Image (cartoon, rainbow, N blue to C red):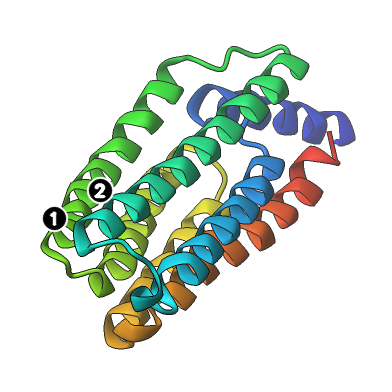
Amino acid sequence: MEKQLEDLKAIREMMEKSTKFLSLSGMSGILAGATAICGAAFAYFYLLRDPSATDYNRFQETMIMLADAMLVLILSLSYAFYFSWKKARKSKQKIFNNVTYKLLYHLAIPLLSGGIFSLIFLLRGDVEMVASATLLFYGLALVNVSKFTYNEIHYLGITEIILGLLAAIFMHNGIIFWTIGFGLCHIIYGFAMYRKYDLKK
């Protein structure tokens, strides 16, 4: 009986490996969250707290915020790729396979749509709506790809959507909800996933 249970467990693990992307590392979430907090702190203390204290016009401020957001995004994606590659290599798996391509496809559609949507707000000067839009579309992207990876990603996505709606209601506090969503939530979920999956291995 015990051997049959072990066989069933082994079959289940094999099926999960063939249908889910399990190389996602919690450490990438922790570092992405820390990077987002640094990016939000820069945007707030350098631009948003007292815009009149700088010599930049509205367009220059928009470009600086856009560059800040792009740097946070590039670093976060770099963390995700590096630690996923490292974890896949350790478990002797390929990081790029059919599941990976499906995950990237379902992730890209909401993210690109949300990025363009947020950029339109930013260029129009509606900075208050950017935090809400990025959180909402990011949450939808996570929910969309959660079927291809760990279940925790689904709950992280729901959390981001809720924070995005709150940021739309309390627009003048959008930077706070953005910091919580992309910063604190990533650190908490990343730490939980690191303990549950990475340390166990």
Q: Which mark is residue 120?
A: 1
How far across and how far down the image is residue 24, in percent?
61, 35
| Kind of element beneath mark 1 | helix
Is any atom of residue 155 visible in this view? no
Q: Mark 2 points at which residue?
A: 115
Q: Which mark is residue 68?
A: none
Judging depth in this view, the residue of 3 and 177 nearest the camera is 177
Determine the CA span between mark 2 and mark 1: 9 Å
- In the rendered view, tell whether residue 3 sits above or below residue 61: above
Relative horizontal placement of residue 77, taking residue 114 as reference (left or right): right
The residue at the far front in this view is 55
How far across and how far down the image is residue 106, in percent?
31, 37
Quarter holding the C terminus? top right
- In the rendered view, tell whether residue 178 sits above or below residue 172: above
Quarter holding the N terminus? top right
Residue at the location (49% across, 46% down)?
A: 72
Name the residue type under label 1: Ile
| Kind of element beneath mark 2 | helix
Q: Decide: marks 2, 1 in contact (CB < 8 A)?
A: no
For label 2, count other residues whose C-alpha is less than 10 Å away and answer few (under 14), some (14-19) or many (20+).
some
The residue at the far right in this view is 2
